[in-house]
Amino acid sequence: MPSLRHQLLATVIPKVRRSRELENEPVERARVEAWHRTLEPGLPTRAVPRFGQRWDVRVEDIGFPSYVLTPRGRRATRTLYYVHGGAFMAPIDPVHVRYATRLADAIGARIVLPTYPLAPEHTWADSHDALVADAGRWAGEEGGVVLAGDSAGGGLALAIAVAMRDRGLTPATHLVMHAPWVDLTTSTPETRAVDAIDPWLFFGKLQAYALWWAGSSDDLGRPEVSPALAELAGLPRAMVLYGTRDLLHPGCRLLVRRAAEAGWDLTAIEEPDLIHVYGILPFAPEARRAFRQVVAFVDGGVLR
Protein backbone atom coordinates (compact mmCIF):
# COMPACT_ATOMS: atom_id res chain seq x y z
CA MET A 1 0.00 0.00 0.00
CA PRO A 2 1.37 3.46 -0.85
CA SER A 3 2.71 5.52 2.04
CA LEU A 4 0.84 8.55 3.31
CA ARG A 5 3.55 10.79 1.86
CA HIS A 6 3.17 9.19 -1.54
CA GLN A 7 -0.60 9.61 -1.40
CA LEU A 8 -0.10 13.26 -0.50
CA LEU A 9 2.24 13.71 -3.48
CA ALA A 10 -0.33 12.02 -5.73
CA THR A 11 -2.81 14.70 -4.68
CA VAL A 12 -0.53 17.73 -4.57
CA ILE A 13 1.63 17.28 -7.67
CA PRO A 14 -1.22 17.37 -10.22
CA LYS A 15 -2.56 20.53 -8.55
CA VAL A 16 0.83 22.26 -8.47
CA ARG A 17 1.48 21.26 -12.08
CA ARG A 18 -2.06 22.31 -13.04
CA SER A 19 -2.63 18.98 -14.73
CA ARG A 20 -5.77 18.70 -16.81
CA GLU A 21 -6.99 17.05 -19.97
CA LEU A 22 -6.44 18.54 -23.41
CA GLU A 23 -9.00 21.16 -24.50
CA ASN A 24 -8.06 20.87 -28.14
CA GLU A 25 -4.77 20.47 -29.94
CA PRO A 26 -4.44 23.99 -31.46
CA VAL A 27 -5.17 25.63 -28.09
CA GLU A 28 -2.65 23.39 -26.35
CA ARG A 29 -0.02 24.01 -29.02
CA ALA A 30 -0.46 27.78 -28.71
CA ARG A 31 -0.26 27.55 -24.91
CA VAL A 32 2.95 25.53 -24.93
CA GLU A 33 4.63 27.68 -27.57
CA ALA A 34 3.76 30.84 -25.61
CA TRP A 35 5.19 29.24 -22.46
CA HIS A 36 8.40 28.33 -24.29
CA ARG A 37 8.91 31.97 -25.24
CA THR A 38 9.04 32.87 -21.54
CA LEU A 39 11.64 30.26 -20.53
CA GLU A 40 14.96 31.48 -19.23
CA PRO A 41 18.13 29.69 -20.39
CA GLY A 42 20.25 27.89 -17.86
CA LEU A 43 20.18 24.98 -15.47
CA PRO A 44 17.63 25.09 -12.60
CA THR A 45 19.69 24.28 -9.51
CA ARG A 46 17.64 25.75 -6.68
CA ALA A 47 16.59 22.29 -5.42
CA VAL A 48 20.20 21.17 -4.97
CA PRO A 49 21.76 22.08 -1.61
CA ARG A 50 25.09 23.95 -1.91
CA PHE A 51 25.12 23.37 -5.65
CA GLY A 52 27.66 26.09 -6.41
CA GLN A 53 30.02 24.81 -3.74
CA ARG A 54 29.82 21.19 -4.83
CA TRP A 55 29.71 21.26 -8.64
CA ASP A 56 31.66 22.92 -11.43
CA VAL A 57 29.48 23.52 -14.49
CA ARG A 58 30.61 23.65 -18.09
CA VAL A 59 28.26 24.13 -21.05
CA GLU A 60 29.02 22.28 -24.26
CA ASP A 61 27.33 23.13 -27.55
CA ILE A 62 26.20 19.91 -29.28
CA GLY A 63 23.68 21.79 -31.41
CA PHE A 64 21.93 22.70 -28.16
CA PRO A 65 23.31 23.16 -24.63
CA SER A 66 24.63 20.12 -22.79
CA TYR A 67 25.64 20.77 -19.18
CA VAL A 68 28.66 18.92 -17.79
CA LEU A 69 28.74 18.88 -13.99
CA THR A 70 32.06 17.91 -12.41
CA PRO A 71 32.11 17.27 -8.66
CA ARG A 72 34.35 19.26 -6.37
CA GLY A 73 36.13 17.39 -3.61
CA ARG A 74 35.93 13.93 -5.12
CA ARG A 75 37.15 12.19 -8.25
CA ALA A 76 34.60 11.18 -10.87
CA THR A 77 35.14 7.56 -11.89
CA ARG A 78 32.40 7.42 -14.55
CA THR A 79 29.73 9.54 -16.24
CA LEU A 80 26.00 9.72 -15.58
CA TYR A 81 24.29 10.80 -18.80
CA TYR A 82 20.84 11.90 -17.65
CA VAL A 83 18.05 12.69 -20.12
CA HIS A 84 15.20 14.65 -18.55
CA GLY A 85 11.51 13.96 -18.89
CA GLY A 86 8.62 16.34 -19.45
CA ALA A 87 6.55 14.82 -22.28
CA PHE A 88 9.12 16.13 -24.79
CA MET A 89 7.60 19.60 -24.35
CA ALA A 90 8.76 20.70 -20.90
CA PRO A 91 12.30 21.82 -20.02
CA ILE A 92 14.61 20.32 -17.46
CA ASP A 93 13.18 20.73 -13.95
CA PRO A 94 14.84 21.28 -10.56
CA VAL A 95 13.65 17.79 -9.57
CA HIS A 96 15.70 16.30 -12.43
CA VAL A 97 18.86 18.15 -11.38
CA ARG A 98 18.37 17.21 -7.74
CA TYR A 99 17.93 13.53 -8.58
CA ALA A 100 20.86 13.43 -10.99
CA THR A 101 23.25 15.05 -8.50
CA ARG A 102 22.18 12.66 -5.72
CA LEU A 103 22.62 9.64 -7.96
CA ALA A 104 25.98 10.87 -9.28
CA ASP A 105 27.23 11.36 -5.73
CA ALA A 106 26.14 7.83 -4.82
CA ILE A 107 27.83 6.15 -7.81
CA GLY A 108 30.91 8.37 -8.05
CA ALA A 109 30.05 10.04 -11.35
CA ARG A 110 30.20 13.34 -13.17
CA ILE A 111 26.92 14.33 -14.83
CA VAL A 112 25.98 15.26 -18.36
CA LEU A 113 22.56 16.90 -18.74
CA PRO A 114 21.60 17.57 -22.37
CA THR A 115 18.78 20.09 -22.82
CA TYR A 116 17.35 18.89 -26.12
CA PRO A 117 15.04 21.16 -28.16
CA LEU A 118 11.38 20.77 -27.26
CA ALA A 119 8.15 19.95 -29.07
CA PRO A 120 6.01 21.23 -30.71
CA GLU A 121 8.58 23.55 -32.28
CA HIS A 122 10.96 20.59 -32.68
CA THR A 123 10.75 16.85 -33.30
CA TRP A 124 12.95 13.87 -32.47
CA ALA A 125 14.93 14.47 -35.68
CA ASP A 126 16.32 17.78 -34.36
CA SER A 127 18.25 16.16 -31.50
CA HIS A 128 18.55 12.40 -31.99
CA ASP A 129 21.88 12.24 -33.84
CA ALA A 130 23.49 14.77 -31.53
CA LEU A 131 22.36 12.91 -28.40
CA VAL A 132 23.62 9.58 -29.73
CA ALA A 133 27.00 11.03 -30.70
CA ASP A 134 27.36 12.84 -27.38
CA ALA A 135 26.44 9.81 -25.27
CA GLY A 136 28.73 7.67 -27.40
CA ARG A 137 31.62 10.07 -26.82
CA TRP A 138 31.16 9.92 -23.05
CA ALA A 139 30.83 6.13 -23.18
CA GLY A 140 34.41 6.04 -24.43
CA GLU A 141 35.72 7.95 -21.42
CA GLU A 142 37.23 6.28 -18.34
CA GLY A 143 34.64 4.31 -16.37
CA GLY A 144 32.09 4.42 -19.17
CA VAL A 145 28.64 5.95 -19.08
CA VAL A 146 25.48 5.17 -17.12
CA LEU A 147 22.60 6.17 -19.35
CA ALA A 148 19.48 7.21 -17.43
CA GLY A 149 16.27 9.17 -17.74
CA ASP A 150 12.69 9.56 -16.60
CA SER A 151 9.40 9.54 -18.52
CA ALA A 152 10.05 10.97 -22.00
CA GLY A 153 13.72 11.12 -21.06
CA GLY A 154 13.66 7.44 -20.13
CA GLY A 155 12.31 6.66 -23.59
CA LEU A 156 14.98 8.88 -25.12
CA ALA A 157 17.66 7.08 -23.11
CA LEU A 158 16.46 3.76 -24.51
CA ALA A 159 16.33 5.18 -28.05
CA ILE A 160 19.89 6.44 -27.61
CA ALA A 161 21.03 2.99 -26.42
CA VAL A 162 19.39 1.34 -29.45
CA ALA A 163 21.11 3.76 -31.84
CA MET A 164 24.49 3.37 -30.09
CA ARG A 165 24.23 -0.39 -30.62
CA ASP A 166 23.18 -0.03 -34.25
CA ARG A 167 26.02 2.42 -35.00
CA GLY A 168 28.66 0.27 -33.35
CA LEU A 169 29.45 2.82 -30.63
CA THR A 170 30.78 1.88 -27.20
CA PRO A 171 27.69 0.86 -25.21
CA ALA A 172 26.61 2.26 -21.89
CA THR A 173 27.58 0.16 -18.89
CA HIS A 174 24.03 0.43 -17.50
CA LEU A 175 20.68 1.85 -18.54
CA VAL A 176 18.21 3.13 -15.92
CA MET A 177 14.66 4.17 -16.84
CA HIS A 178 12.08 5.67 -14.49
CA ALA A 179 8.56 5.20 -15.92
CA PRO A 180 9.84 5.62 -19.47
CA TRP A 181 7.59 6.66 -22.34
CA VAL A 182 8.64 3.99 -24.81
CA ASP A 183 5.58 3.42 -27.01
CA LEU A 184 4.23 6.62 -28.54
CA THR A 185 1.86 4.64 -30.78
CA THR A 186 -0.12 3.79 -27.62
CA SER A 187 -0.53 0.26 -28.99
CA THR A 188 -1.38 -1.10 -25.54
CA PRO A 189 -5.20 -1.14 -25.16
CA GLU A 190 -4.91 -1.06 -21.34
CA THR A 191 -3.70 2.54 -21.52
CA ARG A 192 -7.23 3.93 -21.88
CA ALA A 193 -8.35 2.11 -18.74
CA VAL A 194 -5.43 3.49 -16.72
CA ASP A 195 -6.45 7.01 -17.79
CA ALA A 196 -9.26 6.79 -15.25
CA ILE A 197 -6.92 6.26 -12.28
CA ASP A 198 -3.86 8.35 -13.15
CA PRO A 199 -4.18 11.72 -11.37
CA TRP A 200 -1.34 13.36 -13.31
CA LEU A 201 -1.21 12.25 -16.96
CA PHE A 202 -4.04 12.40 -19.51
CA PHE A 203 -4.67 10.31 -22.60
CA GLY A 204 -5.56 13.21 -24.89
CA LYS A 205 -2.35 15.05 -24.06
CA LEU A 206 -0.38 11.83 -24.45
CA GLN A 207 -1.62 11.50 -28.03
CA ALA A 208 -1.01 15.16 -28.90
CA TYR A 209 2.48 15.32 -27.43
CA ALA A 210 3.42 12.02 -29.09
CA LEU A 211 2.45 13.36 -32.50
CA TRP A 212 4.31 16.62 -31.88
CA TRP A 213 7.49 14.71 -31.05
CA ALA A 214 7.16 12.25 -33.92
CA GLY A 215 6.41 15.01 -36.40
CA SER A 216 3.98 12.81 -38.32
CA SER A 217 1.84 9.75 -37.63
CA ASP A 218 4.10 7.77 -39.98
CA ASP A 219 7.03 8.24 -37.57
CA LEU A 220 5.26 7.28 -34.35
CA GLY A 221 6.41 3.66 -34.54
CA ARG A 222 10.03 4.17 -35.56
CA PRO A 223 12.68 3.10 -33.01
CA GLU A 224 13.92 6.65 -32.40
CA VAL A 225 10.40 7.57 -31.21
CA SER A 226 8.93 4.32 -29.82
CA PRO A 227 12.00 2.29 -28.77
CA ALA A 228 9.91 -0.42 -27.09
CA LEU A 229 9.03 -1.52 -30.63
CA ALA A 230 12.69 -1.72 -31.71
CA GLU A 231 14.89 -4.82 -31.77
CA LEU A 232 16.00 -5.10 -28.15
CA ALA A 233 18.67 -7.80 -28.23
CA GLY A 234 22.20 -6.72 -27.50
CA LEU A 235 21.39 -3.69 -25.35
CA PRO A 236 23.19 -2.86 -22.08
CA ARG A 237 22.01 -4.25 -18.76
CA ALA A 238 19.00 -2.21 -17.78
CA MET A 239 16.51 -1.44 -15.04
CA VAL A 240 13.00 -0.05 -15.41
CA LEU A 241 10.97 1.23 -12.44
CA TYR A 242 7.30 2.18 -12.68
CA GLY A 243 4.05 2.24 -10.75
CA THR A 244 0.66 0.94 -11.84
CA ARG A 245 -1.20 4.23 -11.24
CA ASP A 246 0.67 5.61 -14.22
CA LEU A 247 -0.70 6.07 -17.72
CA LEU A 248 2.65 4.92 -19.12
CA HIS A 249 2.81 1.64 -17.22
CA PRO A 250 1.16 -0.48 -19.96
CA GLY A 251 3.95 0.64 -22.28
CA CYS A 252 6.50 -0.31 -19.61
CA ARG A 253 4.93 -3.76 -19.35
CA LEU A 254 5.13 -4.07 -23.14
CA LEU A 255 8.84 -3.26 -22.92
CA VAL A 256 9.34 -5.91 -20.23
CA ARG A 257 7.57 -8.55 -22.33
CA ARG A 258 9.53 -7.72 -25.45
CA ALA A 259 12.80 -7.66 -23.50
CA ALA A 260 12.15 -11.19 -22.26
CA GLU A 261 11.41 -12.35 -25.81
CA ALA A 262 14.65 -10.77 -27.05
CA GLY A 263 16.79 -12.15 -24.21
CA TRP A 264 17.70 -8.64 -23.06
CA ASP A 265 18.84 -8.37 -19.43
CA LEU A 266 16.20 -5.98 -18.08
CA THR A 267 15.38 -5.82 -14.37
CA ALA A 268 11.79 -4.62 -13.92
CA ILE A 269 10.43 -3.16 -10.69
CA GLU A 270 6.67 -2.66 -10.79
CA GLU A 271 5.11 -0.96 -7.76
CA PRO A 272 1.34 -1.30 -7.23
CA ASP A 273 -0.66 1.93 -7.04
CA LEU A 274 2.31 4.30 -7.35
CA ILE A 275 2.18 7.32 -9.62
CA HIS A 276 4.29 8.47 -12.55
CA VAL A 277 8.07 8.73 -11.94
CA TYR A 278 7.57 7.92 -8.26
CA GLY A 279 11.24 6.96 -8.09
CA ILE A 280 12.59 10.49 -8.56
CA LEU A 281 10.03 12.36 -6.47
CA PRO A 282 11.33 13.86 -3.22
CA PHE A 283 10.32 12.95 0.32
CA ALA A 284 8.39 9.67 -0.17
CA PRO A 285 9.78 6.40 1.24
CA GLU A 286 9.00 4.69 -2.07
CA ALA A 287 11.44 7.06 -3.79
CA ARG A 288 14.12 6.33 -1.19
CA ARG A 289 13.65 2.60 -1.80
CA ALA A 290 13.88 3.14 -5.57
CA PHE A 291 17.07 5.15 -5.11
CA ARG A 292 18.69 2.30 -3.16
CA GLN A 293 17.60 -0.14 -5.85
CA VAL A 294 19.11 1.95 -8.63
CA VAL A 295 22.42 2.44 -6.80
CA ALA A 296 22.64 -1.29 -6.03
CA PHE A 297 21.91 -2.11 -9.66
CA VAL A 298 24.55 0.25 -11.02
CA ASP A 299 27.15 -0.83 -8.47
CA GLY A 300 26.38 -4.52 -8.84
CA GLY A 301 24.95 -4.94 -5.36
CA VAL A 302 21.83 -6.62 -4.03
CA LEU A 303 18.47 -4.95 -4.72
CA ARG A 304 16.51 -4.16 -1.55
Image (cartoon, rainbow, N blue to C red):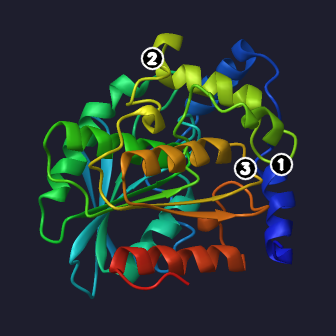
Q: Is residue 266 above or below residue 55?
A: above
Numbered circle sitting on residue 199: 1
Instruction: Give, as a three-letter code, the residue at label 3.
Output: Asp
**At 25% across and 58% down in the image, what residue appears?**
172
**Residue 134, position in %: x, y?**
22, 46
Q: In which quadrant of the rendered image does the C terminus lie?
A: bottom right
Q: Disc 3 designates what residue?
A: 246
Instruction: Give, as a three-letter code, the residue at label 2.
Output: Asp
Quadrant hosting residue 27: top right
Q: Is residue 213 left or right of residue 264?
A: right
**Residue 257, position in %: x, y?**
53, 47
- Precedes in sequence: disc 2 or disc 3: 2
Q: Disc 2 designates what residue?
A: 219
| Distance from Cα at disc 2 to Cα at disc 1 | 29 Å
Instruction: Give, as a three-letter code, the residue at label 1.
Output: Pro
Q: Secondary structure at mark 1?
A: loop
Q: Secondary structure at mark 3?
A: loop
Q: Are marks 2 and 1 in contact (CB under 8 Å)?
A: no
Q: Is residue 285 above or below residue 140?
A: below
**At 64% across and 28% down in the image, what residue appears?**
32
